[in-house]
Image (tube, grey):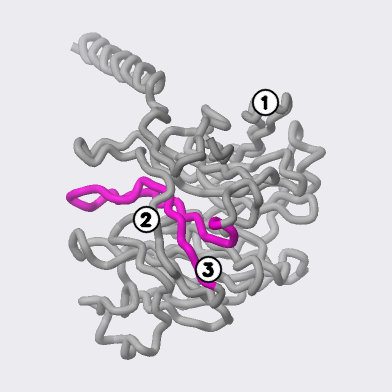
């Protein structure tokens, strides 16, 4: 009987492996992606398991990729100049949700759930990387514990701490974006913004240097509420509503009465749709794309997981006016989700502008990094 059970297990494992292998062969389906005229998309790096947050070194010759479901951090290089990465380094393994990556002054910083790591002089140590722990006192809760990190114009490293739940009223450090001075000998996180359920992407406006960030709305209130958010934080100390209000005007049924009137909280600059899971966002400052995209925001919508009809699974372009008011949001790239069958083959996570003005996009479902470029044809 035991031999039969083992044989059956081996058979199903082999069958699963075979199916996965066949699936992987045809998994990336670029022919389904729709872009504005003159743009094209190609695979810049494949076989990058659970490709998440992106960062690059000073000259753009190395791209760093964080990882959430896995435990690794990668460095990718295009060594032959053909426009595709052909060299992959595993910088670390066995880490706990090393989602966030950031580069500054020659060093790579990686965010785990509770720790910030530093790989010194990473450009010269790709084949023999070592790291030191910069700070290890962030909460160790896994729920929304993965982090996107980036250095701000003030030289501080901005580190979000997501709510440790779908909906709750947690202690102060949770549901915030913090910042730390990585050069300090006595690091103490400073809370920059409050009331943020789970931000996995932010950037600073190219001219005003104000912080903008995405935020994922709460679940289990139905298909259509609340919206996820794009927020603007021109100063420290603002509160964006969680857990009392969502999307600026949706009162939470459990915690709404424990908070203040909605006018006490900062409303989103733009509602991004219910359960679209907006993650990475960046301002476009390059010259390769047409001038109409200058200083616009590109957002990667990872896509809904708990909605009866899936939405998201796309890149959008948010147009701002001269006063940083949102003019409109338009779909820039889509096709990872088949709306008719509700099947998805990819999920965009982060976006990052390259030195030549093209844009990289990570995908943690198709396990790759795309490059979007413009040639006008």
Label 2 element class:
loop
Closer to the eye: label 3 or 1: 1
Q: Is residue 5 above or below residue 42?
A: above
Please name whichever residue, 265 or 195, is drawn nearer the observer in this view of the structure.
Answer: 265
Q: Which residues are magenta?
A: 292-321
Res 277 label:
2
- Callout 3 secondary element: strand
Q: Residue at x 40, y 19 (%)?
A: 25
Task: Give the side of residue 366 with respect to residue 106, left or right.
Answer: left
Report which quarter residue 272 is drawn in: bottom left
- Viewer-proximal residue among 197 and 368: 368
Is residue 373 visible in the rendered image? The answer is no
Residue named by callout 1:
82
Q: Position of residue 324 (x, y in %)?
A: 53, 74
Q: Is residue 308 magenta?
A: yes
Label whose residue precedes the other's in the sequence (2 or 1): 1
């Amino acid at each position: 009987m035991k031999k039969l059970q083992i044989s059956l297990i081996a058979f199903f494992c082999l069958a699963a492996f075979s199916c996965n292998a066949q699936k992987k062969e045809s998994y990336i389906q670029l022919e389904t992606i729709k872009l504005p005229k003159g743009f094209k998309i190609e695979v810049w790096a494949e076989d990058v398991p659970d490709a998440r947050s992106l960062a690059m070194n000073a000259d753009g010759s190395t791209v760093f990729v964080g990882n959430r479901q896995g435990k690794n951090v990668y460095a990718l290089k295009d060594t032959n100049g053909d426009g595709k990465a052909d060299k992959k380094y595993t910088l670390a393994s066995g880490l706990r949700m090393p989602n966030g990556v950031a580069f500054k002054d020659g060093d790579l910083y990686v965010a785990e759930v509770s720790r910030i790591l530093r790989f010194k002089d990473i450009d010269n140590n790709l084949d023999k990387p070592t790291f030191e722990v910069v700070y290890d006192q962030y909460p160790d809760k896994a729920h929304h514990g993965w982090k996107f990190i980036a250095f701000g114009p003030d030289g501080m490293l901005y580190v979000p701490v997501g709510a440790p739940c779908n909906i709750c009223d947690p202690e102060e450090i949770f549901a915030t974006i913090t910042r730390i001075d990585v050069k300090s000998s006595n690091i103490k996180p400073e809370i920059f913004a409050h009331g943020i359920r789970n931000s996995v992407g932010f950037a600073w406006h190219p001219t005003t240097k104000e912080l903008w960030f995405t935020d994922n709305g709460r679940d289990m209130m139905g298909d259509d509420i609340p919206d996820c958010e794009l927020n603007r934080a021109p100063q420290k100390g603002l509160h964006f509503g969680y857990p009392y209000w969502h999307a600026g005007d949706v009162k939470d049924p459990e915690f709404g009465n424990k908070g203040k009137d909605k006018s006490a909280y900062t409303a989103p600059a733009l509602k991004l749709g219910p359960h679209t899971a907006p993650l990475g966002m960046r301002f476009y400052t390059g010259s390769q794309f047409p001038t109409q995209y200058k200083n616009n925001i590109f957002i990667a919508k990872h896509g809904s997981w708990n909605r009866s009809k899936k939405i998201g699974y796309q890149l959008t372009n948010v147009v701002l006016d001269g006063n940083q008011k949102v003019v409109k949001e338009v779909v820039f790239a889509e096709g990872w989700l088949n709306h008719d069958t509700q099947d998805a083959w990819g999920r965009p996570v982060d976006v990052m502008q390259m030195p030549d003005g093209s844009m990289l996009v990570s995908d943690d479902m198709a396990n790759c990094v795309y490059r979007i470029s413009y040639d006008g044809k």
